Image (spheres, rainbow, N blue to C red):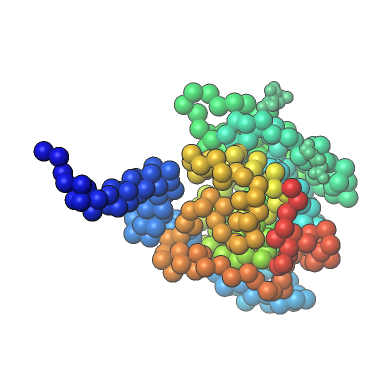
Amino acid sequence: MLMPIRRLLTFLPIFLLLIVTLFYVFQNQYQLRNAISYASRPLWDHSEAPQNVLPHFYSEGIEMDAHTCILHGWTKRADEPNVKVLDAVLMSTELDLLEIRLNELDSVVDYFLIVESNATFTGLPKDTYFRNNRSRFAKFEDKIVYQFFPGYSLAKGESAWDVEARTRGAMSSLISQKMLQFPSSTKSLVIMSDMDEIPSRHTVQLLKTCDFGEAIHLQLRNFLYSFEWFLGFGSWRASARIWDDKSYYRHSKSTDRILADAGWHCSYCFRTIPEYIVKMKGFSHADRIGGRINLLDPGYIQATICKGRDIFNMLPEAYSYVDLFSQLNLEPLKTAVGLPRYLLENSENFRFLLPGGCLRQT
Ligand SMILES: *[C@@H]1O[C@H](CO)[C@@H](O)[C@H](O)[C@H]1NC(C)=O
Ligand SMILES: *[C@@H]1O[C@H](CO)[C@@H](O)[C@H](O)[C@H]1NC(C)=O
């Protein structure tokens, strides 16, 4: 029997709403699925971050001496002149951060080890930025130990994580090779961090001066897009270690000890919009791009940077609801106090990294 026209009309808005809802769900299924899993994350997951946070004491100009070591519960190394500091990073596209890094750490680092591939972890071809721009770093040439890692497209069943592991393996070999050139009495203090994780100079000096043990993680101030958007102190993967034959180049937890406030982690801190696109395509979490092509739209990316929103348009990876809500309501920082000195001394060139400089080159 046919429904009377009037009843049909009453139901029409409900039908329309249902169709619109279904359409929205279908369009955004990837984002929704992630929103649900991320929003519930504090319930089902807990951070594997080191829990034993060691207080860090520093004031401009303080002597790195026995007294400062004792302040941290450590003793001054008797063999400090025999300690060599190796800063080891995998090169991606971040030449600007490399420049800031080399200048920040130059006075405390003996060798900068750089491994670079011509493919991303996901197997896409990529320029060898360091090799192509090496002359820009001529000032550090004596300290740079560079190794090219030939990239390849992923074999069946191989994931970006596998490629990342092999690339890290190449760095482990490079470190061991370099150490063969040192006298046997040498202790090698290796800093392991991503290019965008920059330990502060005074932190490395402290670790060189004082016997902190075998390994320690470095808690870094976490920033997004530039030093304008501060996410808190959640960055812990960087670490420092006295290298031995069992050591390997890692970005995972190696000890429960972590030194507070030891530097800066600037994620997605790029000068140009195309760099954002390369990074989003090549990131090991490439699954996050999902089915929504417009996440790679330059106008969308620019607006996201200026608003301090998540570039993947998702809830941040947070393990407690306190963190979660604070990260969703980012306020732009008005302070640029305590940043790498080279950045401020060259502020015209690095405007995009400083508060008020969110516009990027296209
Ligand atoms: C990377 O370089 C290697 C060796 O030079 C070459 O065989 C390979 O095809 C290159 N891979 C890509 C993705 O360009
Ligand atoms: C550095 O190398 C890249 C990749 O080859 C190139 O596109 C770029 O123009 C070079 N210069 C700078 C300043 O990035």
Residue 135 is left or right of residue 314, and the answer is: right
Q: Nearer the viewer, residue 29 or 68?
A: 29
Q: State the residue at coordinates (53%, 62%).
A: 234
Q: Is residue 220 visible?
A: no
Quick one: 268 or 2, which is closer to the camera? Answer: 2
Q: Position of residue 259 (x, y in %)?
A: 58, 65
Q: Residue at x 37, y 53 (%)?
A: 36
Q: Residue at x 83, y 58 (%)?
A: 349
Q: Is residue 204 above or below residue 268?
A: below
Q: Quadrant of residue 322?
A: bottom left
Q: Position of residue 92 (x, y in %)?
A: 68, 42
Q: Residue at x 46, y 60 (%)?
A: 318
Q: Is residue 59 above or below residue 1?
A: below
What is the residue that sits farthest to the front in this orientation? Answer: 5
From the viewer's perspective, is residue 158 above or below residue 51? Answer: above
Q: Nearer the viewer, residue 155 or 2?
A: 2
Q: How many marks?
A: 0
| Quadrant position of residue 333 | bottom right
Q: Could one spot residue 21 in this view of the protein? A: yes
Q: Is residue 38 left or right of residue 106?
A: left
Where residue 171 appears, x then y in whole percent?
A: 66, 39
Left or right: residue 230 versus residue 7 is right
Of the four image quadrants, the one with ligand 2 is top right
Q: Quadrant of the N terminus?
A: top left
Task: Please provide percent x and percent y for residue 81.
Answer: 77, 59
